[in-house]
Amino acid sequence: MPTRRSFLKQSGLAAATTLLANRLSYAQQLTQQNTPAPNTAPPQNAIQQMRATAATTPIKQTKLRDTVFLLQSVGGNIVCQIGPDGKLLIDSGFATAARRLLQTIEKLDAHAVKLLINTHWHFDHTDGNAVLHDAGAFILAQENTRLRLSTAQTIKALNIQVPSAPTSALPQATFSDREKVYFNNDELDLTHAPNAHTDSDIFIHFVNANVLHTGDLWFNGMYPMIDDGTGGTINGMIRGVDQCLALADDKTKIVPGHGLLGDKDALQKYRDMLVNVANRIEKMKIAGQTLDQVVAAKPTADLDAAWAKGVVKPDLFVTLIYNTL
């Protein structure tokens, strides 16, 4: 593992943009990702609140290619591939929206759901697993996703307790570093990004369709959540994004875990912001400043207008980077 100093030398720094602030609850922000909200702590029933919202929130459908579609509602972005082998889904969203998800994709073609791939373990990407499994989906994920789902977890940065998932929600096949799937006349390359957003993250490249799903390595237009309680680190986030950039070209449709559909240029700007902020905070930490001192110094102030629009507000973002350097 390279040191932070040597890693930043390799990385190449770039500037980002301008300002806004204040922290809001996870439940509120996942349902209204670009809407400012009051400064509150996440409620204990955050998962139940999001499930309730997901039950009635419309599912937006965007055609990426002739056989690949983006589906967006409450929770993580979902991709559906259709074709003669059956339907393939990336992530399952919330259980309360899973039936409507199935109804939505039934209109795409006549084939049944056959395969579900989880980008990582977090509930806003896996809560619908059991419903989709019962509908016929075989579930595939990185091995840490199954380990995390099979036992109770705590997202400590957000003070959210997550109970263990039922057996029917657990991945039925897992892999460690890489997996290749041939499905519906395309090659899907699945790659583990260690210790990034969590310890279970993967990104999925549809080689022929030239579509890339980054999972929660990328929060488009927002400061990302780094789940330091389940293995997430800022260095891992940057390395994972670099891997995604290496796969993309100017025509690649890049699906973030949260936020709008993007492209290589938007992902590059996000990557440069990550490196820029991490470099600033590292210098302060090396100089001996405490977490409280670094947070009080507002090292992201000139970037907040552009990036403080999602789940993670500046003080939390600074804290997560400081704690994982």
Image (spheres, rainbow, N blue to C red):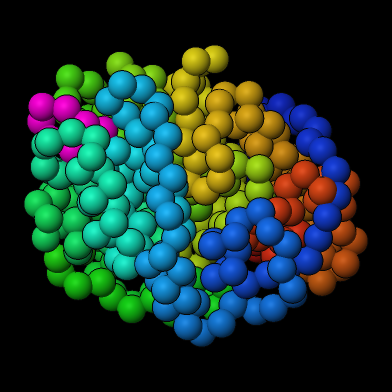
Q: Nearer the viewer, residue 174 or 94?
A: 94
Look at 24% across and 59% down and name the residue there: 99
Instruction: Say if residue 284 shows up in the picture.
Output: no
Whether the magenta-drawn stretch holds residue 83 is answered as: yes
**Vertical relation: 278 (above or below) 187:** below
Using the rendered view, name the quadrant where residue 167 is placed. Answer: bottom left
Q: Nearer the viewer, residue 262 or 319?
A: 262
Q: Nearer the viewer, residue 308 or 245?
A: 308
Pinpoint residue 90: horizontal percent, then vertical percent. Answer: 31, 43
Residue 263 lies left or right of residue 144; in this view the side is right
Pinpoint residue 201: horizontal percent, then vertical percent. Answer: 40, 48
Look at 82% across and 48% down and name the residue there: 305
Pinpoint residue 146: horizontal percent, then vertical percent. Answer: 25, 60
**Vertical relation: 2 (above or below) 315:** above
Look at 69% across and 78% down and name the residue there: 40
Instruction: Say if residue 18 shows up in the picture.
Output: yes
Residue 29 lies left or right of residue 284; in this view the side is left
Quadrant into which the C terminus falls: bottom right
Q: Which residues are magenta?
A: 81-87
Pinpoint residue 142: horizontal percent, then vertical percent. Answer: 28, 49
User: Which secondary structure class fits the magenta region best?
Assistant: loop
Point out the residue furthest to the bottom here. 44
